[in-house]
C-alpha cells in the first residue's frame, strides 16, 4: 500500500510518500503506526507521540482503530491548521 | 435553479469581488451573500511573522471541503457556495482563504459560512508553517478550533 506523510511527519521521516508491505499481523491504523515507528530513527521520531498523529484512508479521516485491509493510500499527519 | 458550487485550492491570490460576481451571475434568487476571508497576520502574540507557508494534501483537501459543502447544502437552503484556499508562501496582509455562502435570506448564509469555516479549520488537511525572526516552525493546532467545529454537531 501507498503511505503518505505531511507537515512535520513528512519532515521527520524525510520523505513524502512510499510503498510499504507490512506483515499480516498489522491490521489497524494503530498497528501500522507501531510498525512504522520500528522502521528506523526517523520513523521513531515522527511517530513518538502516536496520539497526536491523524490518519486518513483513501482521502477520508479515520480513527486509529480502523482496519487497513483494502486501503490503497494511507496518510499520516499532525492536527490540521488551515483556514 | 441548481446551487452553484466552486471549490479551488490554488497558489494564486483571489479577487473577492470577482468571486461574488461569478456566484450571482444570471441569478435573481439570491438575497444574501456572506463573505468570510481569512488574512495572514503579521504577528502572533508578541512575535512578528514574516510569512506563512501552507501545505495541503492534494485530492483529500478538495474531497474534504466538498463533503463539508454538501453537508452545509443539506442543512441550509443555499443557492451557492464558493470555497477557495491558497497554498504556498503567503505574506502578512495577503488572503489565505475565502468562503462565500449565498442564500435567499441572510440567516442561512451567515450560519453556513460559519459552519464551513469551523469545519474547514478543524478537518481540511492543510498545515501552516510560520517564518519568525527566531526561525520557522509548524503552527500548533488549537483545541478551540475542534470545539468550534464540534458545536455544530450538537442538536
Image (cartoon, helix red, strand yellow):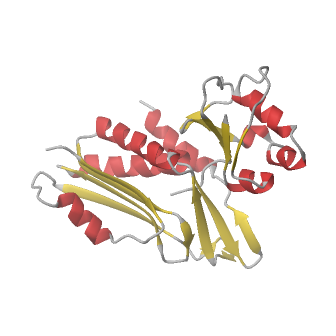
- Of the pair A35 and B112, the residue shown nearer to us: A35
Image quadrant holding the C terminus of chain B, namely top left
Please, is residue B88 above or below residue A4 in the view?
below
Where is residue B134, by image quadrant? bottom right
Please, is residue A24 above or below residue B141 in the view?
above
Q: Is residue B44 left or right of residue B92?
A: right
- Numbered circles on residues, count: 0
Image quadrant holding the N terminus of chain B, namely top left
- Of the pair B109 and B6, the residue shown nearer to us: B6
- Of the pair A35 and B44, the residue shown nearer to us: A35
Find the residue positioned furthest to the right.
A41
x, y percent for residue B122: 54, 47
Q: Is residue B134 left or right of residue B105?
A: right
x, y percent for residue B60: 51, 45
Please, is residue B107 above or below residue B94 in the view?
above
Residue located at (47% from left, 43% from top): B64
Q: Is residue B111 left or right of residue B134?
A: left
x, y percent for residue A12: 79, 54
x, y percent for residue B66: 40, 44
Residue located at (69% from left, 52% from top): A16
Where is residue B47, by image quadrant? bottom right
Residue located at (26% from left, 69% from top): B18
Residue located at (82% from left, 32% from top): A35
Amino acid at each position: 500500500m501507498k503511505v503518505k506523510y505531511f507537515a512535520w511527519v513528512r519532515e521527520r521521516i524525510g520523505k513524502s510518500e512510499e510503498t510499504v508491505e507490512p506483515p499480516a499481523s498489522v491490521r489497524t491504523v494503530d498497528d501500522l503506526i507501531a510498525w512504522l515507528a520500528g522502521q528506523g530513527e526517523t520513523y521513531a521520531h515522527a511517530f513518538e507521540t502516536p496520539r497526536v498523529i491523524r490518519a486518513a484512508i483513501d482521502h477520508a479521516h479515520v480513527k486509529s482503530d480502523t482496519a487497513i485491509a483494502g486501503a490503497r493510500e494511507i496518510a499520516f499527519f499532525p492536527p490540521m491548521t488551515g483556514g | 435553479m441548481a446551487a452553484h458550487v466552486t471549490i479551488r485550492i490554488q497558489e494564486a491570490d483571489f479577487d473577492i469581488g470577482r468571486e461574488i460576481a461569478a456566484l450571482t451571475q444570471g441569478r435573481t434568487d439570491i438575497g444574501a451573500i456572506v463573505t468570510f476571508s481569512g488574512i495572514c497576520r503579521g504577528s502572533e502574540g508578541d512575535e512578528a511573522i514574516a510569512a506563512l507557508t501552507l501545505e495541503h494534501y492534494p485530492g483529500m483537501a478538495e474531497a474534504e471541503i466538498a463533503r463539508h459543502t454538501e453537508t452545509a447544502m443539506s442543512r441550509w437552503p443555499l443557492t451557492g457556495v464558493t470555497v477557495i484556499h491558497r497554498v504556498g508562501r503567503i505574506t502578512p496582509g495577503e488572503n489565505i482563504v475565502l468562503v462565500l455562502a449565498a442564500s435567499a435570506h441572510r440567516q442561512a448564509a451567515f450560519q453556513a459560512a460559519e459552519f464551513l469555516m469551523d469545519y474547514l479549520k478543524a478537518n481540511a488537511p492543510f498545515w501552516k508553517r510560520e517564518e519568525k525572526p527566531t526561525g520557522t516552525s509548524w503552527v500548533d493546532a488549537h483545541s478551540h478550533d475542534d470545539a468550534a467545529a464540534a458545536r455544530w454537531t450538537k442538536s
